[in-house]
Amino acid sequence: MRIRRGEDHLLLAGVDEAGRGSLCGPVVAAAVILPGDFFLLGVDDSKRLSPRRREALFRKILRGAVCWAIGASSPYEIDRLNIKRAAEKAMREAVLRLKIKPSLVLVDGFPLSDLPFPQVPVVGGDGKSLAIAASSIIAKVVRDRMMVYYHRRYPCYDLIHNKGYGTKRHLAALREQGPSPIHRLSFNWRG
């Protein structure tokens, strides 16, 4: 299924998450409702965009959106629930926080349980739906900004550069320093 803007739903929301594969920090989700005539050149899956391009698009998406919201699951919740359920929780939370209730929710990847709105799961949705791609950019920028903040508290892990993912420098710091309070203890970073 190829879904783009102009769907027959007046209030179409896209939802996606960022940080699922990271070794530390929260998983962050964003939900966004865009106007039916919204168009912004360059919106794509956040993983395909440079940090600079994501930041520029982020501001334009927020200015043009009908509404948007964020949800998150902490490292503790990720360890307690598992990453899949924690990501679902964050995505559901983002949708439920929208100030305007959507007619339909396009979910990147998998359906969300207990969502009180009609939904369509779209595998690879951040490359197929403008609304999902926009939500992926919002989630990624918000999460990256959080990781920059955490870098100030835990500089030895080089979070400003790796955003919590398992680079050589991050893994070496984990071996030398052990985990910080924001590390996901259920993830296999010990090697």
Image (tube, rainbow, N blue to C red):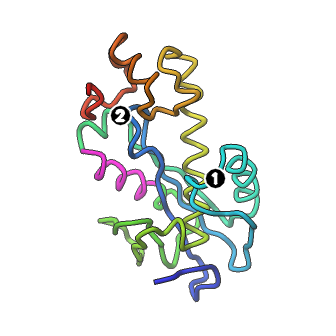
Position of residue 20 measured from the top left corner of the image (x, y, whole percent): 39, 46
Q: Main secondary structure of the magenta part?
A: helix
Closest to the observer, 11 or 110: 110
Between disc 1 and disc 2, the foreground one is 1
In the depicted view, which residue is nearer to us: 9 or 167? 167
Query: Is 76 within the magenta?
Result: no
Q: At numbered mark 1, what does the secondary structure look like: helix, strand or loop?
A: loop
Quadrant, the N terminus: bottom left
- Front position in the image: 55 or 169: 169
Q: Is residue 88 left or right of residue 131?
A: left
Q: Which residue does the numbered mark 2 point to in the structure image?
A: 75
Q: Is residue 86 magenta?
A: yes
Crowd class of label 1 (few under 14; some 14 to 19; many from 20; radius 10 Å) = some
Q: Is residue 50 above or below residue 170?
A: below
Q: Earlier in the sequence, mark 1 or mark 2?
A: 1
| Quarter location, residue 57 | bottom right
The residue positioned 48% from the left and 59% from the top of the image is 16
Q: Quadrant of the C terminus?
A: top left
Considering the numbered disc 2 on the image, is that residue within a helix, a strand or a loop?
Answer: helix
Q: Which residue is mark 1?
A: 49
Residue 36: where, in percent of width, then height?
68, 79
Q: Residue at x 57, y 84 (%)?
A: 9
Mark 2: amino acid: Pro
Q: Which residues are magenta?
A: 82-93
In the rendered structure, find residue 11 and report the number of the disc placed on it.
Answer: none
Residue type for callout 1: Leu
10 Å neighbourhood of mark 2: few (<14), some, or many (≥20)?
many
